[in-house]
Image (tube, rainbow, N blue to C red):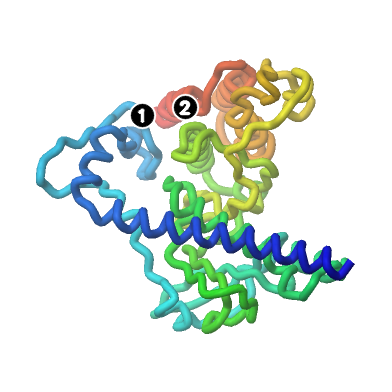
């Protein structure tokens, strides 16, 4: 028995060590890539850069109607990706963050309110309070107590890697990290794995209904743009497997995804078409070679609508506009081949009508 536990602990350690090595390689590659101006220009030649929406509402919604392409010339690159990767914190200065209090803990990590140079930040660490660790400690099936922190640290590293590779205005911005070792002291001066992100307030659909209908409609359009980005991300089509509104934060009036534990690029496995139903609804998704083909995008649309869109758009405008909005969402999601981009464009037209 002791040998099995020791062996299991060794395998778990190897797994997280492999992830750390991968993380280091991604970081090194990213540093080289983002420091090379030629590669940056070349990247922008083949990439469509989203620009601000032409909807004159004073917000930063994105639009697909305007495409900016960069040419191969030695001029300053606008919207350069390097600006998206500027990070304030590393192991050299992360210990200078002053932790004020805990903001809460969940399955994987605890989030703390920190202050650095007068600015408030969110500090994420795995502690003994998180659910994954507590359950492991209660089972007492570990070789040493430190083993119970490995899975949660793995998930935090995964989130850090996702934030390294995914960039969208509605994804919480990571502003630094430090990976030292496996130590879990809970103190920024020697804790093993620490992630620092911009600070936001908890998103609550019920309370969010108190904002203007225009703001709620804009938020819906922005989140649909996020789903369109997820459908064509650098990591492939992404799915939020366990979507909850508690995974979102509000930062400067923008709703942002702040928890990426449950984001995956794998599609659901199946043996029959019925196993590809979403919430017991048949969206016409086919089981092809044991995989629910292209289920991720529809899965996201279904649950974003049921857990966010349908809640925040319930009232606040004329009956005709509200009905048209609900029909656009319901019809768009119901259609087998509809996309988040198409639904977003429909809602943009409704918002223009509302403002005219």
Task: State which quarter of the image contains the C terminus.
Answer: top left
Q: Position of residue 170 (x, y in %)?
A: 47, 47
Answer with the quarter of the image where residue 234 lies: top left
Residue pictured at 47% horizontal, 78% vertical = 115
Residues 219 and 263: in front is 263
Q: Answer above or below: position of 183 versus 241.
A: below
Q: Answer above or below: position of 140 versus 323.
A: below
Q: Answer above or below: position of 56 versus 135.
A: above
Residue on which disc 1 sits = 64
Left or right of 161? Residue 10 is right
Residue pictured at 52% horizontal, 58% vertical = 160
Residues 335 and 91: in front is 91
Q: Label 2 neighbourhood size at 10 Å, few (<14), some (14-19), many (20+)?
A: some
Check contact, mark 1 vs mark 2: CB within 8 A. Answer: yes
Q: Position of residue 301 (x, y in %)?
A: 61, 31
Looking at the rendered structure, the secondary structure element under dot 2 is helix
**Residue 315 shows up from this direction:** no
Answer with the quarter of the image where residue 10 lies: bottom right
């Amino acid at each position: 028995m002791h040998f099995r536990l020791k062996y299991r602990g060794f395998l778990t350690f190897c797994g997280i060590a492999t992830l750390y090595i991968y993380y280091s390689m991604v970081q090194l590659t990213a540093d080289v890539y983002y420091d090379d101006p030629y590669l940056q220009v070349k990247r922008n030649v083949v990439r469509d850069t989203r620009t601000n929406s032409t909807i004159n509402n004073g917000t930063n919604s994105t639009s697909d109607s305007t495409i900016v392409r960069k040419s191969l010339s030695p001029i300053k690159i606008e919207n350069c990706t390097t600006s998206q990767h500027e990070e304030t914190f590393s192991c050299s200065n992360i210990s200078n963050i002053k932790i004020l209090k805990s903001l809460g803990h969940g399955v994987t990590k605890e989030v703390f309110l920190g202050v650095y140079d007068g600015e408030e930040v969110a500090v994420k660490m795995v502690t003994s309070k998180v659910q994954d660790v507590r359950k492991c400690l209660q089972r007492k099936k570990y070789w040493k107590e430190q083993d119970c922190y490995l899975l949660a640290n793995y998930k935090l590293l995964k989130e850090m890697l996702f934030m390294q590779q995914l960039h969208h205005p509605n994804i919480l911005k990571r502003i630094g990290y430090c990976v030292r070792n496996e130590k879990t002291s809970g103190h920024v001066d020697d804790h093993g794995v620490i992630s620092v992100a911009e600070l936001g307030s908890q998103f609550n659909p019920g309370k969010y209904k108190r904002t203007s209908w225009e703001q709620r409609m804009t938020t819906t359009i922005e989140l649909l743009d996020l789903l369109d980005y997820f459908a064509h991300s650098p990591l492939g089509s992404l799915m939020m497997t366990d979507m909850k509104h508690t995974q979102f934060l509000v930062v400067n009036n923008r709703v942002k995804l702040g928890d990426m534990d449950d984001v995956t690029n794998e599609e659901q496995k199946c043996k029959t078409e019925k196993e590809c139903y979403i919430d017991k609804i048949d969206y016409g998704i086919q089981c092809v070679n044991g995989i629910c083909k292209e289920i991720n995008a529809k899965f996201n649309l279904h649950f974003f609508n049921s857990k966010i869109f349908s809640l925040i758009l319930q009232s606040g405008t004329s009956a005709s506009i509200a009905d048209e909005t609900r029909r656009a969402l319901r019809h768009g999601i119901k259609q087998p081949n509809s996309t988040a981009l198409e639904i977003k464009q429909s809602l943009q037209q409704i918002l223009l009508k509302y403002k005219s």
